[in-house]
Structure formats: structure tokens, C-alpha cells
Image (spheres, grey):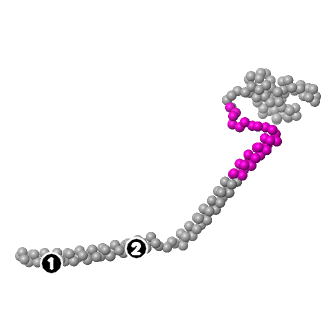
Amino acid sequence: MTADHLREKNIMRADFNKTNELLKEINAALQVSLEEVEEKYLKRESKPEDIQMITELKAMLTERDQVIKKLIEDNKFYQLELVNRETNFNKVFNSSPTVGVINPLAKVSVRCMCMSSRNMTTGVSITHCCVPCNSPKDVLLRVKLPRWLLQIPSARSGLPGTSRSER
């Protein structure tokens, strides 16, 4: 039995080795085929719909870039125009504003302009101003109003320190 057993064992081993070699050849062929398919997939042609979508998106992108460039140029133009107009205004009206130095928390005491002023044409003393002329300490700002403006009831109604009884 041992000789038959050894012969049968050798036959089975030979069959197994042949089958194993055959499977290795099939595996190598499948591996080569897989690599070819992957390469073909990576180098495939684009779909016409995809190409059309890409061209549309590129066109939209260039259009938006042009709009953004135009807006930036317009913004620069308007900024320069604003500076130019402000400079010309300051030259014409001889004013030199100090921008950004106003402290809103600091109390400013300004004397009422109408307390001692007299109307030069009529000689009549002007006693109207935007707030009552009690004391300069309790008023932050007092402005002299023209006589023609004081005759308009709606002009005085919104001013600080005025009430309906003062009209």
C-alpha cells in the first residue's frame, strides 16, 4: 500500500502543480488585462456634454473676471473722484477739515452767537437761536438761525431745546 499510496500522492502533487501553474498564468494574464483597462480608462475621451459644460464654465469665469476688473476700476475712479472733489471744495471754500479727530465724549462749550449780535441792516437785536440762551455751560452747541428760517414753524419744531410754547 505504501507504493500505491506514494504513486497516487505523486500524481496528485503533479496535478496540483500543473493546476497551480495554470492558475498563475491565468492570474498574470488577468493582471495585464486589468492594467490595460485601467490605462484605457485614464486616457479615455471626454464626453461631449462634459466638454460643453467645461467651455460654458470657462466662459462664465472669464466674464465674471471682466466684471470684477471693471468694478475694481470703477471703484478706484470713484475714490479718486471723491478725493478730487473734496480737494476742490476745500480749495474753493478755503476750509481745512480735520478728519477723524472729533471726540464725541468731550464736552464743547460754545457761546451763543445771537446773545450780542445785532442785525446790521435793521439794527434790531436778534434773540432767537436753536436753544434757549440761559447758560453756555449747559449747552454743547448753539447755532444762530437766520430770521427767514425762524418764521417757518416746521423749521424750529425739530431743533433741540425748542418746544411748542416757544414758537
Q: Quadrant of the C terminus?
A: top right
The residue positioned 44% from the left and 70% from the top of the image is 42
> Outermost residue, left direction?
1
Q: Where is 127 relative to 50, above or below?
A: above
Q: Is residue 82 magenta?
A: yes
**Residue for point 30% across, 76% down:** 26
Q: Magenta part of the protein: which range?
A: 75-103
Numbered label attached to residue 11 = 1
Quarter that holds the N terminus: bottom left
Mark 2 highlights which residue?
A: 37
Q: Quadrant of residue 110?
A: top right
Q: Amino acid at mark 1?
A: Ile
Side (left or right) of 52 relative to 96: left
Q: Which image quadrant is residue 97 in? A: top right
Our reading of the magenta stretch's main secondary structure is helix
What residue type is disc 2 on?
A: Val
Q: Is residue 101 magenta?
A: yes
Residue drawn at x 19%, y 77% as measured from the top left: 15
Q: Which mark is residue 76?
A: none
> Is 105 located above or below residue 85 in the figure?
above
Give percent across and percent down for residue 70.
Answer: 68, 57
Tell me the distance, in whole angstroms, between the alpha carbons under discs 2 and 1. Answer: 39 Å
Dot 1: element: helix
